[in-house]
Image (spheres, rainbow, N blue to C red):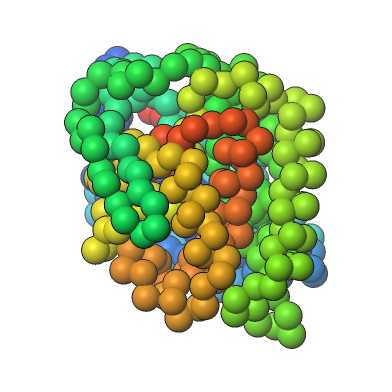
Amino acid sequence: MTRVAAIDCGTNSIRLLVADADPATGELVDLDRRMTIVRLGQGVDRTGRLAPEALERTFAACREYAAVIKEHGAERLRFVATSASRDAENRDDFVRGVLDILGVEPEVISGEQEAEFSFTGATRELTATGATGELTVTGVAGELTATGATRNGGTGGLERPFLVVDIGGGSTEFVVGDDRVRAARSVDVGCVRMTERHLVVDGAVSDPPTEAQISAVRADIEAALDLAERTVPLRTARTLVGLAGSVTTVSAIAQELPAYDSAAIHHSRVPLARVREITDWLVRSTHAERAAVPSMHPGRVDVIAAGALILLSIMERTGAREVVVSEHDILDGIAWSIA
């Protein structure tokens, strides 16, 4: 096995994975996996620049991660930066800071590269071992029923091709493939970008948003889906796999988890009706009501409504009856790229 460290720095969060990877078996054994909300993309959509306070939050997380990487003795490190740093005029300040702290330059990758890493991370288990954790989450009117909970229990009826959707803070990646990528596209709609563009008034997130604001978010999402469909045949996929914090948080809410639980969330399946119900509640709830959800990360309270709207719009556009939720995503794909 090779001990690797992967860092994924996005618009909303920066995440670290230290793992032992065995390319021969397709096994990736986590040693340390952590996430910090740094909101690197704060204001980028409006100003075109990374804010000084956002850079400092990110560098503080990098210093913490450098200590973890050293403690575990990782042989290889790759740092990938995505949407916010792609868009920023002053991204050289970001690159220099990361290099000083971690000794490697962040690779500011394209949306298409981001999509390929996400696809590899999300589907390698499914294509290599056929393992899924078949947890189907249903429920109406706030009631929840979890059925068919079987982990590592075969393919569980998952059909190919997969549509892997990674809903980030600044962008969303769409990838269609089976054992490899067939088509990919990144579009500039994400939970932070949509929140800052449409749900903020006088410097504060609307509490709750108005119908007009929600309609504006939906219109941007629909336009982005039109753009994605020019490259990626979204409706040809047989299984929708959803990645990143907006999707995993929707699953946690659907399961009414008393705290965020990666094992319960990974490979859970949430039907369209339940996603619609949760989204409807999120866009009509107040900050305090969302913050009271025990599985909700504090850094997602203000952006989760926009993230859920993106997920719901994708499911409605593609006709997906459910979303298979994966905790393995671009971070795992980065790890495999250096293993």
| Location of residue 193 with respect to 127 vertically, above or below | below
Quadrant (top left, top right, bottom left, bottom right) of the C terminus: top left
Q: Position of residue 102 (x, y in %)?
A: 46, 55
For this orientation, the residue located farthest to the bottom is: 202
| Location of residue 315 with respect to 57 vertically, above or below | above
Q: Quadrant of residue 157?
A: top left
| Location of residue 271 with respect to 207 vertically, above or below | above
| Location of residue 110 with respect to 67 vertically, above or below | above
Q: Position of residue 82 (x, y in %)?
A: 62, 48
Residue at horizontal 79 percent and vertical 27 percent from the top: 230
Res. 75 visible in picture: no
Quadrant (top left, top right, bottom left, bottom right) of the N terminus: top left
Residue at horizontal 41 percent and vertical 35 percent from the top: 324
Q: Position of residue 306 (x, y in %)?
A: 61, 59
In the visual, does 117 lie left or right of 123?
A: right
In the visual, does 75 lie left or right of 122?
A: left
In the visual, does 263 lie left or right of 140?
A: left
Q: How many marks?
A: 0
Q: Quadrant of residue 149?
A: top left
Q: Quadrant of residue 231?
A: top right
Q: Position of residue 297 (x, y in %)?
A: 40, 66
Give 107 or 200, whichever is nearer the viewer: 200
Res. 286 visible in picture: yes
Residue at horizontal 57 percent and vertical 50 percent from the top: 168
Give 297 or 64, whichever is nearer the viewer: 297
Residue at horizontal 54 percent and vertical 60 percent from the top: 280
